[in-house]
Amino acid sequence: MAQVRRSPLADQAAELLLERIRSGEWALGAKLPGETTLAPQLGVGRSTVREAIRQLAGRGVLASRQGAGVFVTALDVPEDWDVVLRRADIVSVIEARIAVETEAAALAAERRTPTDLRTIRRAFDHRDQQRGETVELVDADTAFHRAIVVAAHNPILTELFDGFTPRLRQAMIDMLRLRGDHGDDADQDAHADLVEAIAGRDAGGAQARSRAHLQALKAALT
């Protein structure tokens, strides 16, 4: 059984526990042995084991349940979201946007307030004003779609959308420059239809229009 040899002890103990979890010694949902068992196995004191468990809990691998013990909640450290997005190709990001934005559009149609609708309409008008530009249109388009996501009143959807934005922005700018497409009438009309579906509280229509728009964007990138 591998034991800790150098400091910082808690960091090493955490890594040794993580290696054992990765190796399959404990299944997902399994309860870890107690500190009195783990401490001699790792060659450290119980306080070091506690700190190692806290580290892995903070990384999403373990969870302490009061009165029940420590349980495995992931079989590896979840990868940083920014790293995942940087590595993902743009089509994968668009597919993720479809999942997020089509649901957000439906929820926005159901939940939008008068203030939300005014914000969406202002963003739509600003997007219209930026047609013929490149960077400005991409940023105005992002603001428009974000206004719809915000109107869904689901903070997790908003956070996911904001995570996509930096990864997608430059790709969209490059695509517009290559195609020379800076928001034609058909594109703006499609966005107008989405606004009206949300205004009319047509959840199914908003979802369908959002999906059609993003599927067309995906097709343009492939």
Image (cartoon, grey):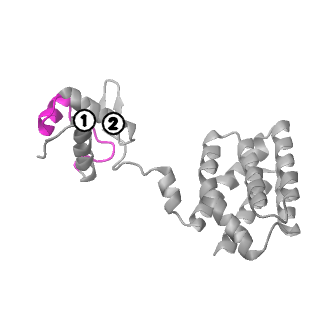
Location of residue 57 with respect to 47 vertically, above or below: below
82 is within the stretch colored magenta: no
| Quadrant (top left/top right/bottom left/bottom right) for the C terminus | bottom right
Give, as a three-letter code, the residue at label 2.
Gln
Q: Earlier in the sequence, mark 2 or mark 1?
A: 1
Q: Is residue 112 visible?
A: yes
| Neighbours of disc 1 within 10 Å: few (<14), some (14-19), many (20+) | many
Spot the residue most to the top.
67
Q: Position of residue 155 (x, y in %)?
A: 63, 39
For label 2, the residue is 55
As rendered, which of 24 and 38 lies closer to the eye? 38
Callout count: 2
| Circle 2/circle 1 CB separation < 8 Å | yes
Judge from the rendering whether residue 53 lies leftward or rightward of residue 217; answer left or right. left
Give, as a three-letter code, the residue at label 1.
Ala
As rendered, which of 8 and 36 lies closer to the eye? 8
Location of residue 62 with respect to 21 vertically, above or below: above
- What main secondary structure does the magenta stretch of the protein show? loop
Quarter location, residue 108:
top right
Residue at image coords 12%, 36%: 43
Highlighted range, magenta: 25-45
Q: Position of residue 78 (x, y in %)?
A: 41, 49
Residue at image coords 66%, 59%: 169
3D distance between C-alphas at marks 2 and 1: 8 Å
Quarter location, residue 92:
bottom right
Residue at image coords 27%, 46%: 18
28 is within the stretch colored magenta: yes
Q: Is residue 204 visible?
A: no
For label 1, the residue is 10
As rendered, which of 95 and 110 lies closer to the eye? 95
Q: Position of residue 29 (x, y in %)?
A: 33, 42
